[in-house]
Amino acid sequence: MKSKIITMCVIVLLAVSLLTIGCAKEEEKGRIIGIDPGAGLMSAAEKALEDYNLDNMELVEGSDATMISALNDAIKNEQWVVVTGWTPHFKFAKWDLKYLEDPKQSFGGEEQINTIVRTGLKEDMPDVYTFLDNFNWTLDDMQKIQVWNEEEGADFYDNAKRWVDENEDKVNEWIKGLEPNSGNGQEVELVYVEWASEIASTNVVRAVLQEKLGYDVELTSVGAAAMWQGVATGDVDGMVAAWLPATHGSYLEEVKDQVDDLGANLHGARIGLVVPEYVTIDSIEELNENAAKFKK
């Protein structure tokens, strides 16, 4: 009996040791700080892990806010950090950052942000459709609002109205030929993902529709999949937040016959892995051999 007890103890200790070693190995992995798990950017990051055989790295789920917090903390202490990133985003105006080169094109090439509306919107609300079809702006336009939105106590809608007031010529081109206040309080429902870029663009669209055209606009923030389904089913009128062709390409493929794609409202967008400029690697290919530096 005594020998059996000793044997069992040895087995238990061995199992505990193996578990500890396994956990240690997991802890040794470098961390890529990600955003919400449903985002197309996260799928691209998972693809990068496979494409580059990044066995020493792990992708950590989070949100835009947690990603920014990790980036901020690391930069304050000049630590190495790698995050999932996209342009336009205020972080590029706030800090000196760079994209890691992606020779295998896991994240695709240049992206654009499209406007997608429900079928039938053109007939039901022709002025809304025309404005949304005309809506287009630049990276600098969007990032200016994003910086305002990061100020303490910022009101996203007030900042959107401020931008509209300061860019009257551009706004007038969007609504050219439309009657002021023609909406008469009719409700328009827009949906978006709660990224800094989409908060900026969707609130600008809301400001124009409400302040210039007289509509009552309701905004709803959801995950990417729900955003696309909402437009496809006609539960909402549209969005200005479709990242294509890579980030949201799979969602568009599922519902392309159920929505109306009005084309790009912003060119020059990009997704990828981002590090501070002081990090002395330049390519995703270099992450594995430097994984220990990305543990924090």
Image (cartoon, helix red, strand yellow):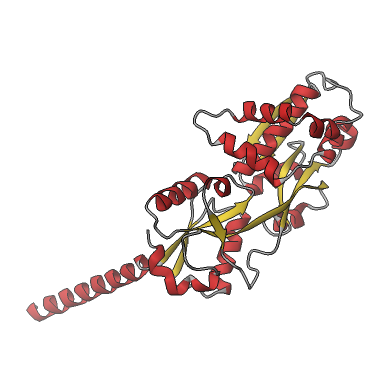
| Picture quadrant of residue 12 | bottom left
Q: Is residue 114 left or right of residue 143?
A: right
* Residue closest to the far left: 2
- Tell me where residue 113 appears, x and y as whole percent: 73, 49
- The picture places residue 78, in percent across and down from the top left corner, at 39, 55
Question: Can residue 193 be seen in this snapshot?
Answer: no
Q: Is 207 rendered above or below residue 95? A: above
Q: Give the residue displayed 58% in from the left and 52% down from the top.
A: 38
Q: Residue at x 83, y 52 (%)?
A: 257
Question: In this rendering, would 235 be left or right of 107?
Answer: right
| Residue 40 rendering spot, x and y as whole percentages | 63, 56
| 112 or 282: nearer the viewer | 282
Q: Is residue 41 above or below residue 93?
A: below
Q: Quadrant of residue 44?
A: bottom right
Tell me the quadrant of the picture where the N terminus can be found: bottom left
Residue at 92 percent of width and 29 percent of height: 177
